[in-house]
Image (cartoon, rainbow, N blue to C red):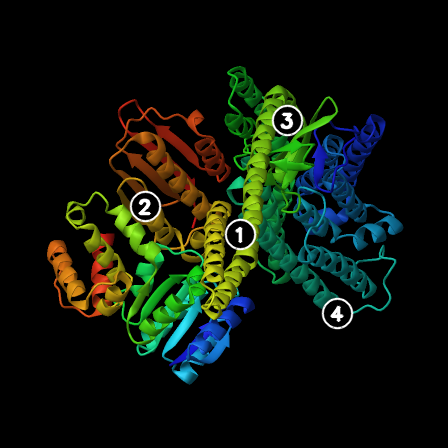
């Protein structure tokens, strides 16, 4: 797997490069501006671009715009946006109409190396990685929702992990239950929410997020 | 004391101009000159031979001498600083000198004849120099100088080639042909210059437009008519046209009209003094400061009148709303400074023609003294408010910049370092999987770092909402709405980015209001609306809770009101007991 990194803090750029290299990811480019990032993505067509949301010169929305541009022009390149603030509005803006190959994580998540590498691999493989804070914020917002109240605690757990972009196998591993039971939970949840089941991992991410956001 | 710049006059006339005896002496000299010239005319063979009916010619020519001298003296005594009066006097005496050719003395004849064409050019000069006595454009100066040169030099040439009889002392080599051509050239040149003068007067009149007051329009028309008649007369003589005699009389009479028009204008000015009565009535009714200008404009009959108030603390003139303004010194308008007890109060910008009526200006400004002082205080209050508003806005902006800088420092410094540290610990932890106890301690250290980061994030958000600056209000408000204690309906109809201070103020307003909803309102739902309107932004937060909120309940809302007001906006809170709470801010935003 090949990755490109845009991060203006040299400490973190090197840290991420090291963590990914140790995990066997080939970091083909590391830079600190959105412009360079776009050039590197064009030249290398990596599997994933890891983008700091706040990049020079204004530290405004440069990273976000670069992420959107990569998603529009290079559909095969996964985009993982890292930020020190995670916001529902920004998550929805990044996903737009597809969660495929898209990730949005709090920067702190880097330090949980195993989880971080797993998220990078998911996004690079066309899956999604949505920060748990986004999912929990949306769930908190809908806490009075009758349909969500009907979910059992276990079903809510599965719903959250699903919304973060995890595969059924990933959920099974985390909750230490069988794949079969995860599948059962997923189909019950979809029934209760009235969503069409049988979607791919990243399609169901968007479906769940949109459901929670509405 | 006040120093007046060029074109600026003070309302208290400092010097009273030429002394009485000088005026009387000149006046007497003018009358004697006219009378003696009248006497030569009746005897003169030149007049009866060339100019026709001696009595009529003598009367018309000397009427001009006397009228120009006397009117000039009147104008000079009234407005000593203007050279117009002196110019009129000079024209009168030059007119007299040219009539010396009617005498029997050869020396006087030669002198008078040499000046024969001088009066028309002097009239042209007088008319173009109205009302200041100065020729203002290069073109005007060019016309007049060409006129003097042609009038004198061609006359000397003609006298040199003879044809004037035995009294001409300048005859050198007689040549009737050259004399005839020189005469034609002289007539045509002077005639054309007069027509050019008419053009200049028309341009001046058009440029002054409706602000030109009626009496002055009458004067300018009289001048133009005189110049046209001179041109017609000279063309008729040059081309041998008919009725030269009568045209000459008409021309002389028309030129004599100009001083009459001048007298009419002066009389009108005296009559106008009665408009002061109206001003007193207006002032008696304690006019609002904004009505004062109109009252003065009516009294001075100058609809273009402007008023500027002097603020010594600001060392500048301002309008009634306290906005800085310049005196119209350069634009050819008159400026009158108004002082009261030695201190500058205001300045009037008015039609330059009003400078011919110093008494009227003085009377009006004196009558309006107290009202002007009141209006000046009004203007000063506004200027100070404006200044305060500006400094408040700058304070808010400076505070925001400083907080933004701190947020950046935290983000780029402590936060990044803590994440890197946590990452380092995580790598260590992986390498230490043979020592579970140590790994556990590392994991707990990482948890500590995670909590610190969480706290730092809250601090950062309180310092400056980076999301707002980076991504706009709509995105940032979605998070606030999602995190609120009650379901929030969010409606943002702002498509473009707004000024950052405004976005940040709106963000904190929503943030604080939603926090209050969670803390005090016991509401079941709330709504947030941000609407871009023509020239402001409306931010409204409404909940269906218990109401009864007041600004004293949290310093938060008071601080927000300050911030909104500093941006020139208004913040209002309705919170009837049991009726929910509505916080509504309107913040100006001119595109």
Q: Secondary structure at mark 4?
A: helix
Residue at 51% of width from left, 37% of height from top?
Answer: B566
Earlier in the chain: of badge 2 and badge 1, it is 1
Q: CA distance from mark 3 to mark 4?
A: 56 Å
Earlier in the chain: of badge 3 and badge 4, it is 4
**Of labels 2 and 4, the one closer to you:** 2
Q: Which residue is mark 1?
A: B407
Say if residue B577 shows up in the picture. Answer: yes
**Of labels 3 and 1, the one closer to you:** 1
Say if residue A55 shows up in the picture. Answer: no
Q: Is residue A5 left or right of residue B397?
A: left
Q: Secondary structure at mark 1?
A: helix
Q: CA distance from mark 2 to mark 1?
A: 23 Å
**The disc label shown at residue B360, or none:** 3
- Where residue B520 appears, as percent x and y from the top left, is 34, 30
Q: Secondary structure at mark 3?
A: helix
Same chain for mark 3 and mark 1? The answer is yes
- Where residue B384 appears, as percent x and y from the top left, is 60, 32
Q: CA distance from mark 2 to mark 3?
A: 69 Å
Front residue of B142/B341: it is B341
Earlier in the chain: of badge 2 and badge 3, it is 3
Front residue of A115/B84: it is A115
Q: Chain of mark 2?
A: B
Q: Which residue is mark 2?
A: B481
């Amino acid at each position: 797997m090949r990755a490109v990194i845009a991060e203006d803090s040299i400490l973190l750029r090197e840290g991420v490069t090291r963590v990914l290299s140790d995990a066997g990811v080939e970091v083909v480019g590391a830079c600190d501006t959105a412009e360079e990032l776009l050039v590197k993505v064009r030249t290398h067509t990596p599997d994933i671009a890891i983008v700091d949301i706040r990049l020079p010169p204004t530290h405004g929305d440069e990273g976000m715009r670069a992420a959107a541009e990569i998603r529009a022009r290079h559909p095969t390149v996964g985009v993982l946006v890292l930020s020190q603030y995670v916001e529902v509005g920004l998550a929805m803006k990044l996903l737009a109409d597809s969660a495929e190959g898209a990730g949005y994580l709090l920067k702190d998540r880097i330090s949980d190396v195993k989880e971080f590498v797993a998220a990078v691999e998911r996004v690079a493989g066309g899956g999604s990685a949505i920060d748990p804070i986004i999912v929990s914020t949306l769930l908190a917002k809908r806490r009075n929702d009758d349909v969500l109240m009907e979910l059992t605690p276990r079903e809510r757990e599965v719903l959250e992990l699903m919304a973060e972009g995890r595969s059924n196998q990933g959920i099974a591993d985390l909750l230490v239950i069988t794949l079969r039971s995860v599948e059962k939970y997923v189909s019950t949840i979809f029934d209760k929410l009235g969503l069409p089941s049988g979607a791919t991992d990243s399609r169901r991410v968007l479906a769940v997020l949109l459901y929670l956001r509405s | 004391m006040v120093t007046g710049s060029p074109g600026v006059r003070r309302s208290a006339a400092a010097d009273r101009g030429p002394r009485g005896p000088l005026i009387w002496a000149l006046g007497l000299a003018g009358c004697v000159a006219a009378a003696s010239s009248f006497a030569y005319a009746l005897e003169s063979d030149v007049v009866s031979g060339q100019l026709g009916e001696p009595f009529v010619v003598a009367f018309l020519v000397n009427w001009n001498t006397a009228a120009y001298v006397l009117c000039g003296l009147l104008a000079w005594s009234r407005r000593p600083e203007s050279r117009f009066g002196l110019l009129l006097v000079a024209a009168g005496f030059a007119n007299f000198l040219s009539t010396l050719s009617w005498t029997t003395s050869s020396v006087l004849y030669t002198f008078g004849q040499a000046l024969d064409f001088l009066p028309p050019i002097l009239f042209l000069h007088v008319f173009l120099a109205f009302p200041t006595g100065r020729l203002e454009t290069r073109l005007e100066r060019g016309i007049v100088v060409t006129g003097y040169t042609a009038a004198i030099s061609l006359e000397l040439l003609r006298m040199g080639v003879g044809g004037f009889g035995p009294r001409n002392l300048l005859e050198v080599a007689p040549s009737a042909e050259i004399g005839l051509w020189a005469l034609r050239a002289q007539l045509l040149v002077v005639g054309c210059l007069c027509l050019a003068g008419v053009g200049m007067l028309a341009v001046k009149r058009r440029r002054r437009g409706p602000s030109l007051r009626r009496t002055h329009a009458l004067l300018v028309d009289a001048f133009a008519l005189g110049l046209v008649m001179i041109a017609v007369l000279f063309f008729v003589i040059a081309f041998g046209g008919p009725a030269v005699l009568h045209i000459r009389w008409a021309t002389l009479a028309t030129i004599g009209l100009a001083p009459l028009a001048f007298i009419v204008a002066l009389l009108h000015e005296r009559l106008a003094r009665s408009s002061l009565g109206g001003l007193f009535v207006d002032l008696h009714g304690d006019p609002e400061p904004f009505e004062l200008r109109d009252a003065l404009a009516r009294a001075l009959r100058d609809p273009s009148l402007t008023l500027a108030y002097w603020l010594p603390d600001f060392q500048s003139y301002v309008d009634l709303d306290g906005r800085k303004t310049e005196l119209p010194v350069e634009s050819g308008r008159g400026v009158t400074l108004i002082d009261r007890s030695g201190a500058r109060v205001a300045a009037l910008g008015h039609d330059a023609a009003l400078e011919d009526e110093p008494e009227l200006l003085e009377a009006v400004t004196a009558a309006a003294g107290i009202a002007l002082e009141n209006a000046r205080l009004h203007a000063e209050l506004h200027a100070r408010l404006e200044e305060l508003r500006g400094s408040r806005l700058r304070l808010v902006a400076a505070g925001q910049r400083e907080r933004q800088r701190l947020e950046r420092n935290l983000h780029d410094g402590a936060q990044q370092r803590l994440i890197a540290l946590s990452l380092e610990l995580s790598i260590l932890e992986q390498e230490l999987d043979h020592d579970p106890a140590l790994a556990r301690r590392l994991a707990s250290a990482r948890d500590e770092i995670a909590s610190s980061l969480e706290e730092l994030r809250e601090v950062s958000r309180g310092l400056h909402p980076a999301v707002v600056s980076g991504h706009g209000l709509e995105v940032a408000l979605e998070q606030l709405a999602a995190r609120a204690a009650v379901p929030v309906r969010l409606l943002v109809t702002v498509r473009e980015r707004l000024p950052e201070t405004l976005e940040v103020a709106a963000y904190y307003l929503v943030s604080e209001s939603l926090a209050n909803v969670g803390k005090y309102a016991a509401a079941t739902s709330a709504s947030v609306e941000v609407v871009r309107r023509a020239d402001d932004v409306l931010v409204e937060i409404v909940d269906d809770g218990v109401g009864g909120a007041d600004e004293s309940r949290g310093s938060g809302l008071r601080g927000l009101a300050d911030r909104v007001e500093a941006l020139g906006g208004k913040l209002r809170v309705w919170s009837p007991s049991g009726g929910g709470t509505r916080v509504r801010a309107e913040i100006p935003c001119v595109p």
